[in-house]
Image: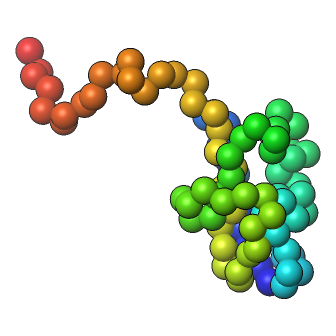
């Protein structure tokens, strides 16, 4: 079955399509896609993964057409970033 693997390191992003066995897991898809060779700093032991924006474990089964996503760690404290209302003054 065909699935996609998505990753962004901030400066670059990739979307790789790959074929995997019908009983493949998220980890199988990531390994088969080649993304780990392209981004050797990816650490699956520390980084979270998901399917279509929903967090899953590496051993989660896949369905045809799934988009596997590898998430970067947060680099700033979201509680310290000011909220933007979209209504800033243009003084």
Q: Residue at coordinates 48% horizontally, 22% vertically from top-left?
A: 77
Foreground pick, 89 / 25: 25
Image-based side of 40 in relation to 71, left or right: right
Q: Residue at coordinates 63% horizontally, 33% vertically from top-left?
A: 73
Q: Residue at coordinates 11% horizontally, 21% vertically from top-left?
A: 90
Q: Residue furthest top?
A: 91
Q: Is residue 80 above or below residue 15?
A: above
Q: For residue 6, say whether it is visible.
A: no
Q: How many marks?
A: 0
Q: Position of residue 43 (x, y in %)?
A: 82, 38
Q: Is residue 66 above or below residue 71?
A: below
Q: Quadrant of the N terminus?
A: bottom right
Foreground pick, 89 / 51: 51
Q: For residue 79, say whether it is visible.
A: yes
Q: Residue at coordinates 25% horizontally, 30% vertically from top-left?
A: 84
Q: Position of residue 44 (x, y in %)?
A: 81, 44
Q: Position of residue 83 (x, y in %)?
A: 27, 28
Image-based side of 28 in relation to 50, left or right: right
Image-based side of 87 in relation to 9, left or right: left
Colouring mode (rainbow / by chain / secondary structure / one colour): rainbow
Q: Quadrant of the C terminus?
A: top left
């Amino acid at each position: 079955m065909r699935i996609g693997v998505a990753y962004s390191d901030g400066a670059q992003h990739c979307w790789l399509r790959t074929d995997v066995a019908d009983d493949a897991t998220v980890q199988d898809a990531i390994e088969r896609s080649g993304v780990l060779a392209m981004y050797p700093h990816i650490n699956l032991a520390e980084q979270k993964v998901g399917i279509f924006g929903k967090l899953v474990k590496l051993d989660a089964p896949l369905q045809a057409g799934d988009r596997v996503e590898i998430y970067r760690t947060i680099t700033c404290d979201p509680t310290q970033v000011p909220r933007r209302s979209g209504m800033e003054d243009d003084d």
